[in-house]
Amino acid sequence: MTTDQHEMVAFMKKFSFATIITAKNGIPLATHLPFSITTREEQIILTSHFAKANNHWQDIENNSVLVIFSEPHAYISTKNYELDLNVPTWNYISIHAYGEGKLITDPENTFKVLEMMIDEYEESYRKKWDHFPMDYKLKMSKGIVAFEIGINDLQGKKKLSQNRTDIEKLNIIESLSDSEDSSARFIASYMMKESEK
Amino acid sequence: MYIPKFNLTTDQQEMVAFMKKFSFATIITAKNGIPLATHLPFSITTREEQIILTSHFAKANNHWQDIENNSVLVIFSEPHAYISTNNYDYRSA
C-alpha cells in the first residue's frame, strides 16, 4: 500500500491513459481515456473528454466514478526466492481514484480542458491548434463531452515484493531489469526506488 | 463499451489471442453502484465454445464474495499510444 499522495500523483501523470468505470443496475461500464491530473484546493481533479457518441458521459454525474491508473506489472518467478517451498506471484502498481463526476458544457471551459491536454501530450501542436479557425474548433468540440472528476478517495497499491528478503528483492530486480518487456523493467525500477527509501 | 464500427473486432480467435498475450487483467464488479476492481492474471480457455476465464483471489481480498450472482467485467488491455496529427495527410483533415 502507499498513502503518499505526491508519489501517487506522479504515477498517475506518468501512466495517464486510464480506465474510467461506473456501474448501472449492477453492471460495470468502462471507457479508456487519457487524463489530465491537477489539484484544486488540495483535491485531485481528473479531467478528460468522451466522444459524444459514447453514452458513458451520461452516467458520470450523480454516480460513483472509479478511474484506474495502472500499467507496469510483472510475473515473479520463484527462481528469485531463496527457498524452493514458495509460490510465484505478480507484481504491479495501481491507483484507484474514486470521485464524483461533473460535465463541462460551456465552450470556454471545454477549450480549457482540451488545451491543457494538448500542452501535456504534444506542446508543439498547441501552435497549430491556436491558429485553427474558430468554427473548426467549435465543430470538433461539439463532438465531445468534457468532464472532471473530483477525487475523494485515492487508493494506491504497490505490490513490489516488500515481504521478501533483500537478496530476493535484488534477484527480482536483476531478472526484471534484463527483461525484453518494458513493463517488467518499470517494475524493476520502481522496486529499486522502493529499496532506496 | 462504446465501439465505433470501424474500431469493432468480432474475430473471437483474435480477441482470445490478445487476452492470452495480455493476460494480467482487471476484474470489476459493482455493489450499491460503487465499482470495485482487482488486478489478476487469468487463464483463458474455451468450454463448448464459451470462453472461460479462471484465476484466484487472495482470500483476504473480500472481492471474491461479490463475483457470484453478479455482473462481472474483466478488462484485458495494455498496448496504447498517443497519435499525433503529424501523421495525418492534411487533405483528409
Image (cartoon, coloured by chain):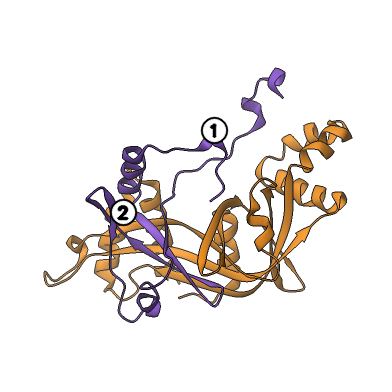
Residue at 35%, 49% in the rendered image:
B22
Quarter occupied by the C terminus of chain A: bottom left
User: Residue extending furthest left?
Assistant: A84
Give residue A24's position: percent from left, percent from top. Answer: 57, 66
Give residue A49's position: percent from left, percent from top. Answer: 69, 51
Q: Residues within 10 Å of mark 2 (few under 14, many from 20)?
A: many
Residue contact between numbered discs 2 and 1, judged by CB atoms under 8 Å: no
From this view, report whether residue B71 is shown above or below residue B2: below
Quarter occupied by the N terminus of chain A: bottom left
Which quadrant of the view contains residue A5?
bottom right
Colour-to-chain, purple: B
Name the mark on residue A176: 2
Q: Mark 1 = which residue?
A: B6
The chain containing the residue under callout 2 comes to A
Of residues B12 and A141, the one nearer the viewer is B12
Q: Is residue A42 left or right of residue B39?
A: right
